[in-house]
Structures are given as structure tokens and as C-alpha cells.
Image (spheres, rainbow, N blue to C red):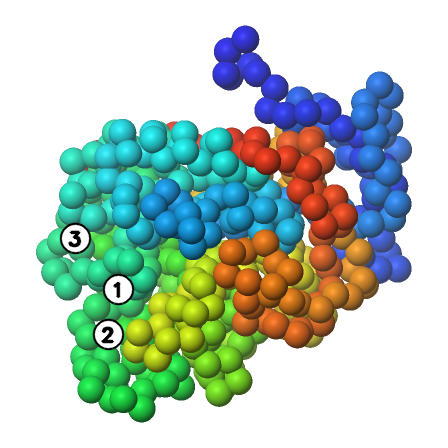
């Protein structure tokens, strides 16, 4: 049997689930999955001869798509690794991830990408896409890598593990190369010159610098300048662009205008930019330190509004764990990043409970809108022809976040002590029950995400 005709997964009949959104208007929903693909959805469908899963009234939603994680593997498996990272994904209701390698070995050639995909295939419990790195050294290999990667990741501003780009001419060559290869650029948008200027003024030589300065050292100005630069490259070269971890209302406004202009620009933000703010600096210390920085409550409100208006496409966690002892170093030496893939659905549901997002928007931005922002077919909907990825959760059951109990190796959480709801009880990946009652039932089995063909721009 060829790979094209091989089953994508298992057969399963899910019965007695409640429809989403939960509440008085919920109805019963059954799902029939065959060969890993949803065959039928509805209250009256049957599943004779198929393995059965009685949802017992739990609410059914599609498996989540986290479009931004760092599992640091290969190279830094002792920090996280695919074993812990994909376990955390299931804990958070995530069945598909888009992963960024931000530590050596970088993915700058087709051979390196093929080796990375095989490495991940043997370790991941969830389906995965691996972004290639967009640096000068990868330019000759972009076309060769295009069929195997959803996009190319470009760090315009320096962050953990990678420096930013100061040379405008090089930025242009990177975007132009991606356009000719036919894949989207996924950009970390902070202007490197502005970052260096503000770091010199606020942090270097200041022994009293703390994370309370972080939103000034990595400012809204730096993000907005970089987003504007990236959008101008879209205009000039015809490149498709996805702006990662949008953190400010100013950046969201630039993206809104670009989309209104008809430019191919997508974007995502993170739960920490929505639920936290720079005002948490004293309480959390360096646990709040991420790049781009977490900004003001007004920015958080603007980002929620942009998600609701479909001006920002999705929420991706930017899951980037570090050992607690690393985070407890002095501010200038503490690495940026926090874990959160293991809480993606409960944190998203919290936005609904607070009234900051409506229930439908909250679901869409971590399912089909997330998948669409990376042009991933067959993910993110409970509909015929889509992959049989299903999460069953109790919308009212409460739990308290304890970092020591989460799957991430880091064993800490910026949300320590928060009472959340919506913890996934059962997770199904392509028709196979892979998580139940707080435990994984598989050690691997994830497969590369199906990709749309590259769309090269012709000269």
C-alpha cells in the first residue's frame, strides 16, 4: 500500500458528547472516524462494528493546533525534548504543533530537515510541522526544503539562541528567497537596532535592572518598526508573511491595515500577552521575561479585540521552557521564554470565562484559524474529511495549576496557583485515544503535517 493510500489513523466511534459551545443550548453529538479521518458527525449517526468511546456528556472540540512551540530537540533535549513537549501538548488538548528550532543544529538544508523530521517522528506523540531556519546560509537550500516545511522562520530581532538581522539588504534577500521558493516567512518581529539601542540605555551597566524594565528594553516601538519592515518586504517581493507572537496594539494595527490592503499577512499572539501584563513584573520576576516583552493591559485588550475581529488569526503558546534555576539568575542573564503548551485549552477557556473572548472565537483561534494561518489542510474542524483529532473536556471542572505537576521539564509555570477550568479529559489523535484521565496512552505515533504544495513566485 502506498503512503498516499495508507490509512491516516485508526477507527473510532465517539458517542454521547456534548456540542460546543457548552451550555443550555448544547446538543448531543456523535462522531464516526475511519482510517483516522472523520466520516460523519451528528446526533443520529451510528458506528456499528467500530471501537466505541462513550463521552458521557463531555464537550467535544477539535484537537488544538499550536502554531508556535520550541521543544529544543535535537540539541537541548535536557531542557525539554519532544518526549516532554509532546506530552505537554496532549495535556493542553493540542494534537498538532508547528515547531521552531532556535538552538543548534539549525535547519538550513534539505538534508538537515529530513534528519530532523525523522528524529521527531520517533519521539512525538502529536502531529508536527518543523519550520526551516531562514538565515543567509539557508538561501541556496530554500527551494529544496520547501516541500517538507510549512514555512521559514526568520528572527529579525535577536532572541534566545539566535541573533537578529541588522542588514536591511539581507532582510530583503531572505524575503525574496522565500518568495521564490514558494513558502511563507514566519517572523520574530523586533527591530534589532532599536533593541540594541534600548538595551545599552536601560540594561547594560545597570546592576539594578529588573524585569520591570523588560517592556521598555524590548519596546512597542521595536516591534512596530519590524512589523512595518516585514510588511514592506511583502509588498516588494510578494512574500507571504506570518508575524509570530504579536504583543502590542500598535503591531496589531499595522497587520490590520496590511490585511485590509489585501496583502498575504497572517499573525498569532500568545496566551501570556492576553492574560498577563508588565504590571505582573514584581509578582513573577523573571518568569515574566519573554521576547517580545509582555506589555500593558491596554495592549492585552487590543489583542483580544484583534482576535475577535479576525485581524489576528490565532493563539500559539511560544512554549519555550527553561530550568527554574536559569530563570532565577539576575535579569540581564536570565533567558527569555515560558512553558505553556500544557495549558493551552484551559488558558483559552479562561479568556471565555472572563468575557475577553466569545466562545466561538476562542475555539477558532486555536483550531481551524490556527491551521489556516499555516495553510494546513485537514486540521482544526469536527467535519467530514478532516483528521479525527478530538478533545473531550468538562467546561466546569476546576483544577489548580501546579508547575511541578505539569509535563514540561521546567516544572514551573507563570500561572502557578491559578484556578482554571477546561482541562482535557480525553484526547483523540486521528482516531486513536492517546490521552485519558491525566495520562498518555502512547509514546510516539505523531506524523508530519500534510502541507499544501509550495507556491513559488516567478521572476
- Which label number is shown at residue 157? 1
Q: Secondary structure at mark 2?
A: helix
Q: Secondary structure at mark 1?
A: loop
Label 1 vs label 3: CA separation? 15 Å
Return the residue nearer the eye: 216 or 143: 216
Label 3 vs label 2: CA separation? 20 Å
Q: Secondary structure at mark 3?
A: helix
**Mark closest to the chain's N terminus, 3 or 2:** 3
Return the residue nearer the eye: 214 or 370: 214
Name the residue: 74% across, 65% down.
399
Return the residue nearer the eye: 56 or 367: 56
**Mark closest to the chain's N terminus, 1 or 3:** 1
Name the residue: 84% across, 25% down.
47
Position of residue 105 measured from the top left corner of the image (x, y, whole percent): 28, 44
Name the residue: 21% across, 68% down.
192
On the image, which quarter does residue 208 sit in? bottom left
Instruction: Answer left or right for 23 relative to 71.
Output: right
**Which residue sits furthest top?**
1
Q: Are marks 1 and 2 in contact (CB under 8 Å)?
A: yes
Q: Is residue 361 visible?
A: no
Reading the image, the residue beneath label 2 is: 195
Between disc 1 and disc 3, the foreground one is 1
Reading the image, the residue beneath label 3 is: 172
Amino acid at each position: 500500500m502506498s503512503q498516499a493510500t495508507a490509512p491516516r489513523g485508526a477507527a473510532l466511534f465517539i458517542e454521547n458528547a456534548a456540542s460546543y459551545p457548552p451550555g443550555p443550548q448544547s446538543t448531543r453529538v456523535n462522531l464516526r472516524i475511519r482510517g483516522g479521518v472523520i466520516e460523519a458527525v451528528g446526533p443520529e449517526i451510528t458506528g456499528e462494528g467500530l471501537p466505541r468511546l462513550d463521552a458521557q456528556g463531555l464537550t467535544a472540540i477539535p484537537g488544538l493546533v499550536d502554531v508556535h512551540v520550541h521543544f529544543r530537540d535535537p540539541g537541548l533535549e535536557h531542557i525539554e525534548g519532544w518526549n516532554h513537549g509532546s506530552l505537554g501538548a496532549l495535556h493542553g488538548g493540542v494534537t498538532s504543533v508547528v515547531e521552531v528550532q532556535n538552538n543548534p543544529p539549525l535547519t538550513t538544508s534539505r538534508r538537515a530537515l529530513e534528519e530532523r523530521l525523522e528524529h521527531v517522528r520517533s519521539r512525538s506523540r502529536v502531529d508536527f510541522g518543523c519550520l526551516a531556519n531562514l538565515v543567509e546560509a539557508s538561501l541556496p537550500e530554500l527551494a529544496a526544503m520547501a516541500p517538507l516545511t510549512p514555512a521559514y522562520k526568520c528572527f529579525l530581532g535577536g532572541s534566545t539562541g539566535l541573533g537578529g538581522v541588522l542588514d536591511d539588504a539581507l532582510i530583503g534577500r531572505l524575503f525574496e528567497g522565500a518568495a521564490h521558493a514558494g513558502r511563507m516567512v514566519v517572523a520574530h518581529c523586533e527591530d534589532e537596532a532599536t533593541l540594541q539601542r534600548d538595551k545599552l540605555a536601560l540594561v547594560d551597566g545597570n546592576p539594578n535592572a529588573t524585569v520591570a524594565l523588560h517592556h521598555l528594553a524590548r519596546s512597542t516601538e521595536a516591534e512596530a518598526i519590524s512589523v512595518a519592515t516585514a510588511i514592506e518586504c511583502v509588498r516588494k517581493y510578494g512574500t507571504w508573511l506570518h508575524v509570530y507572537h504579536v504583543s502590542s496594539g500598535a503591531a496589531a494595527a499595522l497587520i490590520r491595515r496590511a490585511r485590509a490592503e489585501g496583502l498575504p499577512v497572517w499573525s498569532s499572539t500568545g496566551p501570556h500577552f492576553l492574560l498577563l501584563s508588565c504590571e505582573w513584573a514584581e509578582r513573577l520576576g523573571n518568569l515574566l521575561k519573554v521576547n517580545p516583552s509582555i506589555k500593558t493591559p491596554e495592549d492585552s485588550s487590543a489583542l483580544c479585540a484583534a482576535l475577535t475581529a479576525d485581524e489576528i488569526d490565532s493563539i500559539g503558546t511560544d512554549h519555550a521552557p527553561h530550568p527554574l534555576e536559569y530563570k532565577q539568575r539576575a535579569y540581564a542573564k536570565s533567558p527569555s521564554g515560558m512553558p505553556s503548551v500544557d495549558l493551552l485549552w484551559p488558558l483559552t477557556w479562561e479568556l471565555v470565562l472572563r468575557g475577553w473572548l466569545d466562545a466561538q472565537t476562542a475555539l477558532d483561534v486555536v483550531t481551524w484559524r490556527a491551521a489556516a494561518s499555516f495553510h494546513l489542510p485537514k486540521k482544526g474542524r469536527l467535519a467530514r474529511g478532516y483528521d479525527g483529532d478530538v478533545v473531550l473536556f468538562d467546561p466546569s471542572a476546576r483544577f489548580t495549576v501546579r508547575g511541578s505537576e505539569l509535563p514540561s521539564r521546567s516544572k514551573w509555570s507563570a500561572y502557578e496557583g491559578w484556578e482554571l477550568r477546561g482541562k482535557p479529559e480525553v484526547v483523540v489523535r486521528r482516531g486513536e485515544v492517546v490521552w485519558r484521565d491525566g495520562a498518555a496512552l502512547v509514546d510516539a505515533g505523531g506524523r508530519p503535517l500534510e502541507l499544501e504544495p509550495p507556491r513559488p513566485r516567478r521572476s
